[in-house]
Amino acid sequence: MNIQTDSLTELKALVSLLDEPSEDNFAAIHSKIGAYGTLAIPFLKDACKDSLDDSHNHRIKNLISEIYYNDTFNLLSSWSENEGKDLLAAFIAISRLLNPDVDMDKYKSEFEHIRQDVWLELNDNLTALEKLKVLNHIIYDYHNFSGQRNPNGDKLKLYIFDYLLDTRKGNSLSLGILYLAIAQNLHIPVYGVDLPGHFILCYLDEKVNLKPTEEYSQNEILFYLNAMNNGAVFTKNEIDGFIKQMNIQPDKSHFLPCSNKTIIRRLLKEVSKEVKLNGDDDKSAMLLNLVGAVH
């Protein structure tokens, strides 16, 4: 996006005034910078690097977080209106909000490399189980992804896209989203299942015409997958056992495919909970507010 030279000059000047001691004047400066949206981010990051004042840096980081929040809300709202088709885009937007210093383009390229490796091994003559073997081999054997439950006490990391790709470690939700994003991009009918306590995947009968997720029935599911356990296949009976063990009231949503929107709402709620446990109530509330963007 192009920006006129005079606007650029104004933006730089406004950023240089963020150490304004008057709260009223700062509020006006804050508002004007915020109106530039993500265009202001590089200038704010540079200002943060150049400053040695902790309170000044705190102001800048809060403003960056606010800009990313507004941008993420708008992105998720547009994503939702587009039926939530690109699961990875929403996952990356939430990860960027949690870790704004990271260059997500680098990780998008890395994801594309993984997707390409899967694509090269596929052909139209493969059965559902053969396609599953290709996915599992590339994701778990070749690229070494695996499940992790508690990395040094900080479970929040396991929900972040860049941590997932850097360490090859994730939880059932982040690994499940990665698996789904690859499969859906390659038109393999793998969907999420919103099972409480352990997000799982299902492989649908390819002979069934595509339809809204809530219209699928149990007999259209070929098998279930556990992204935390190298994509291992299991049956409905094992879900029944898990539900009894967890003392959960059974619901059809525990067995049937869910939409990408449901997955992202779950991600936001789980991340909000972890952020709250880490002591950041404001950020936790901000993440929970984003659920409203996914309608």
Image (spheres, grey):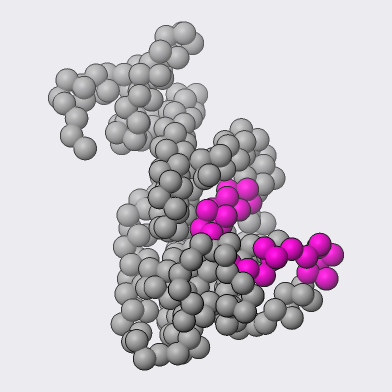
| Left or right: 186 as drawn, with respect to 277 | left
Region of the chain picked out in magenta, as a range: 243-271
Tell me the residue at 56%/57% (across/down): 263
Q: Nearer the viewer, residue 267 or 229?
A: 267
| Left or right: 252 as drawn, with respect to 217 | right
Q: Nearer the viewer, residue 231 or 194?
A: 194
User: Would you say residue 123 sits in the magenta stretch?
Assistant: no
Q: Is residue 177 above or below residue 104?
A: below
* Magenta stretch, main secondary structure class: helix
Res 267 visible: no
Give the quadrant of residue 197.
Answer: bottom right
* Residue 112 coordinates in the image, percent (x, y): 33, 67
Q: Is residue 294 above or below residue 190?
A: above
* Residue 114 coordinates in the image, percent (x, y): 37, 73
* Residue 69 coordinates in the image, percent (x, y): 47, 36
Tell me the residue at 29%/33% (across/down): 39
Tell me the residue at 41%/19% (across/down): 30
